[in-house]
Every structure is written in structure tokens, then in C-alpha cells.
Amino acid sequence: MIKVTKDRLIDAINSFERVGVLVIGDIMLDQFVWGEVKRISPEAPVPVVEVEKESFLLGGAANVAHNLESLSSKPFLAGMIGEDIFGERLLELCRNGNIDTSGIIRQGSRPTTLKTRIIARGQQVVRVDREERKKLSNEVIPLIINGISRVLDDVQGIIVSDYNKGIICEEVMNFLIKSSKERNIPLLIDPKPSNSEFYKKATVITPNQKEASEMAGTEIQGDGDIERCAEKISKGLGIDTILITRGSEGMDLWQRGKGLFSIPTMAREVFDVTGAGDTVISTFTLGLIAGLSPCESAFLSNLAAGIVVGKVGTATVTRNELIKAVESTQVISIKPSGFYG
């Protein structure tokens, strides 16, 4: 049985301040175009959206960095963006959000990934993606590794945010795994199943249920399937800790030699699940760096996710919000394969 106490969690949250964490992965810019539909186009049977406003938010790996900064830590962002206007907007948002961008490489041959969501009357009408999904060229890979190297001495943990846009490749992952082992710092992966082989010997992997099922080649229908799935992933990749997020069903933490720990969702109201996975891996990483056990870190990240899904849009949770959530929860005990309040 593992006791999770308020004082221990709050002490950990307070220690998040200025902790350095490297986020490496696919950096994106999210554009939201808001408007009204009052007529159908005479050119085709599609709605005409009259634009009223637009906004830009950090997405992908950049949103993970934003989550870390919101929790008062010091994020270092590494990856690639284009030499275009959207890259400039992204860097501006990072600067305004106190995110270190010294690890970002700019390339004119590769556009900044932009996801444009057109929303009318609260409903998303269409999403337009502008991106390059090819693997990095042999000339660019050393530039990415050099960008990572510039900040490694300033961080206490590494997060890989893989959206399968080409930044996370075997060469980059091999360097990250070697570097994390040499420095004895945790390396956490938000994965894509198609890149599973790159993640061997990472500290923690955080797939959602669908991704975990694909990675293990096992259908998930119940807790027994979750445990078998986690064991299969662990055996194949040599990873001892696997956190599987399950949406409205909460999350399951599996550890080699300790089995499965299930934690139900803490959300009271769900408005938008966008970016919840980024909140989970950010909070979980900071918890480990602060000295919490994987179970304690999972419980804390579950609380954080419960806050963020109650917000609209690509949202984050602040350190004060997380402290208040801990203060309002009951002292609990977690046992293998179950949750007990």
C-alpha cells in the first residue's frame, strides 16, 4: 500500500520552481479562427464562415513546454521550425511564456507546423494542417543534436514529445538515451507507436490506451488486458515504468515488479481534452524530479489533468491551481490493481 499525503505532494509542487526540463519533439503552432456562419457558399454546398477573431497558441512539444512553465519550472525547447512568419509567431509566444528556445533550429526548407481550426458557433467546422512529415536529413540531424547539447547541462529531466512529424528519429533518440543515462536524469516519452523501437531503455513511457494497444498488439477491454499490454511493452522496450492514460477512466501505472495501479479520473466537468496528455507528462516528470514515487507522481498528474480538461482550448494548469486541488482532495492510499479513498 502506498500512502499519498497532502504535505508531501505540496512540498513537491513547491520544489517545481525553476527546475530545468528539456522538451524535444515536434513543435507546432495552433491557430484558432472564430466566426459565424450566416449563409452557404454559392460556389459549393459549404458554409461561409465570417471571421470575427483569431488567436495563436503553442502546440505539440511547445505546449508541453508551456505546461512546464505554468507549473513554475524552467522549460528548454528543442526541435525545428521554419524560417517563416509562423515560426516568428511561435518564437514570440515562447519568449512571452519564458520558454528557452536556444535548442530550436530554423530551416527554410521545412515549414513551421501549423494547425488551423476554424470554429463557428462553438463548433469546429474544419481543421487545416500545414506540415512536413519527412524524416530529418543527414545534414540536419547533427544540428538538432547540437541544439540539444547546448542545454543538457541546465536540465534535470527530459521529455520527448513525438507526433511522428520526423523530428524524433533513431539518431536523436540514441543520443537522448545515452545522455540521460550519463547524467542520471529521467527521460520520459509521449510516444507514437510507429516509432516504438526508438524508445528502448527510456525511463517512462506515457501512451494513451489506443497507443498502448497498438504498441503491444493487444486489444484492451479490461484491467487484465491493461496489465498484459504493459508487460509486453516493457519486455519489448526495456522500460520499467509505463503510464497509460485512459480518458474518462483515469490512468493506469504499471511498474516492473510492482504490477498495476489504477487511478480514476479526477475531473468533475469535462469541456475539452485537448492537451491533457501534455499536462500529464509535464506534471509526472516534475513529480519524479521532486523525489515523488511514480505512484505519487501519477496521482498528482491525474489531479492536474482533471483541472485542465475543465478548461476550453489548449489549456495548462498553474502551480497554485494544483496546490488547491491537492488541499481539497482526501488523503488516499493506492494499492496494486485498485484505488482506495
Image: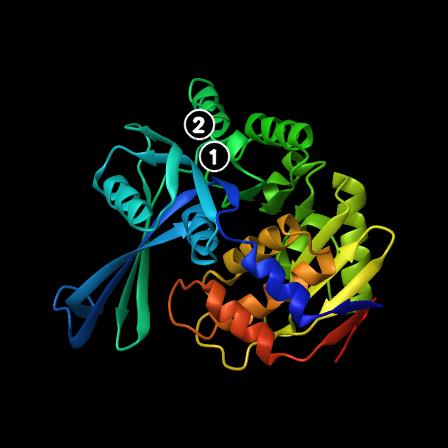
Q: Name the element at disc 1.
A: loop
Write down the quadrant of residue 330 in the picture. Answer: bottom right
Q: Name the element at disc 2.
A: helix
Most foreground residue, 263 or 284: 284
Residue sticking out furthest to the left: 42
Residue at image x 70%, y 62%?
296
Dot 2 and dot 1 residues touching (CB under 8 Å): no
Q: Determine which of the numbered discs, if any, sits on residue 147 in the image.
A: 2
Q: Position of residue 276 (x, y in %)?
A: 51, 63
Q: Determine which of the numbered discs, if any, sits on residue 89 in the image.
A: none
Most foreground residue, 44 or 226: 226
Residue 338 vs residue 86: left or right? right
- Is residue 270 in view from this perspective? yes
From the image, which quarter does the C terminus lie in?
A: bottom right
From the image, which quarter does the N terminus lie in?
A: bottom right
Residue 191 vs residue 237: left or right? left
Residue at image x 87%, y 52%?
257
Residue at image x 31%, y 63%?
126
Residue at image x 18%, y 74%?
36
- Badge 2 or badge 1: first in the primary sequence: 2
Compared with 174, 295 (above or below) is below
Give the amino acid type for the residue marked by disc 1 in the picture: Ile
- Is residue 219 in view from this perspective? no
Distance Cα–Cα, label 2 vs label 1: 13 Å
Q: Position of residue 173 (x, y in %)?
A: 59, 31
Give the amino acid type for the residue marked by disc 2 in the picture: Gly
Compared with 266, 109 (above or below) is above
Q: Position of residue 302 (x, y in %)?
A: 61, 67
Q: Determine which of the numbered discs, if any, sits on residue 167 in the image.
A: 1
